[in-house]
Amino acid sequence: MDRSVLEEIEQRLRKTRDELEQELDRQLDARREQFRYRLQRGKVRFDREILALQKTYRIGLWRYITGARIAILLTAPVIYAVAIPLALLDLSVTIYQQICFRVYGIDLVRRADYVVIDRHMLAYLNFIEKFNCIYCGYGNGVIAYAREIAGRTEAYWCPIKHARRTLDPHPSFASFMEFGDAETYRDWLANGRKSRPAAPPDAAP
């Protein structure tokens, strides 16, 4: 397949993705109106009567715990133990990008764009459910945050596509050079790693 055809397909994919993200934003705005909450300075605000209604759906702690299967309760320590490596990953990639990205001239990844914790604001969740939602939001957010840092690092050091199609590549991958295109790669190195975009801009706050 001709290289220009590949680039055209990639551009169409990016355009489609942008259009879908815009549609997603519109749908989220509609959901906020439906469930009567708003965002103020990044924090969720519900109408008072909605909070009262949500509380009527809350399951008490004792009923929640006694209603759980024994096997589920026994796996809890295993789940929560993963918090340690997650915290270490969070700390290590933050220190790494603060040092190395400044040296490389790569835009820093905004942690707040990936680690989003807000589901504890839902009044229909009990304490355990809120804690679990915080944990899941943190864990998945840290992994996404680390993935973006790794992606921008890859874009700086080795922006070459794989021979095989990868599942859900990071955003920088679309701008990578073709597998086997030695001339473009050497030209890129000769130009100080600046002939192709190294990383996407930070997301808007």
Image (cartoon, rainbow, N blue to C red):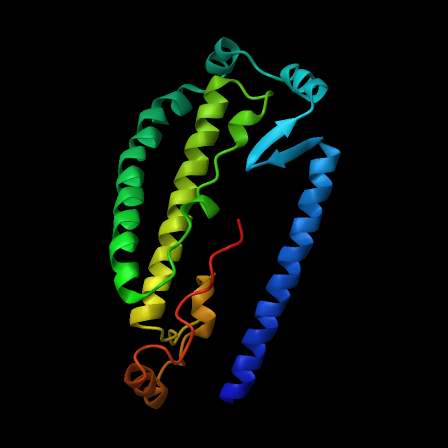
User: Which residue occupies 45% across, 44% down?
Assistant: 112
Residue 122 image point, x, y percent:
58, 25
Residue 181 percent coordinates (x, y): 36, 86
Q: How many marks?
A: 0
**Residue found at x 71% / y 31%:** 35
Q: Residue at x 46, y 64 (%)?
A: 200
Q: Against 97, is 128 above or below?
A: above
Which residue: 38% across, 54% down?
Answer: 147
Q: Position of residue 195 (x, y in %)?
A: 39, 81
In the picture, measured across the screen, residue 37 lies left or right of residue 84, that is: right
Compared with 105, 184 (above or below) is: below
Which residue is outermost to the top? 62
Q: Percent position (x, y) of residue 13? A: 58, 70
The answer to which quarter of the image holds residue 165 is: bottom left
Residue 60 visible to the viewer: yes
171 or 9: nearer the viewer? 171
Say which of 79 and 153 sits in front. Answer: 153
Q: Is residue 1 visible?
A: no
* Left or right: where 149 falls relative to 85: right
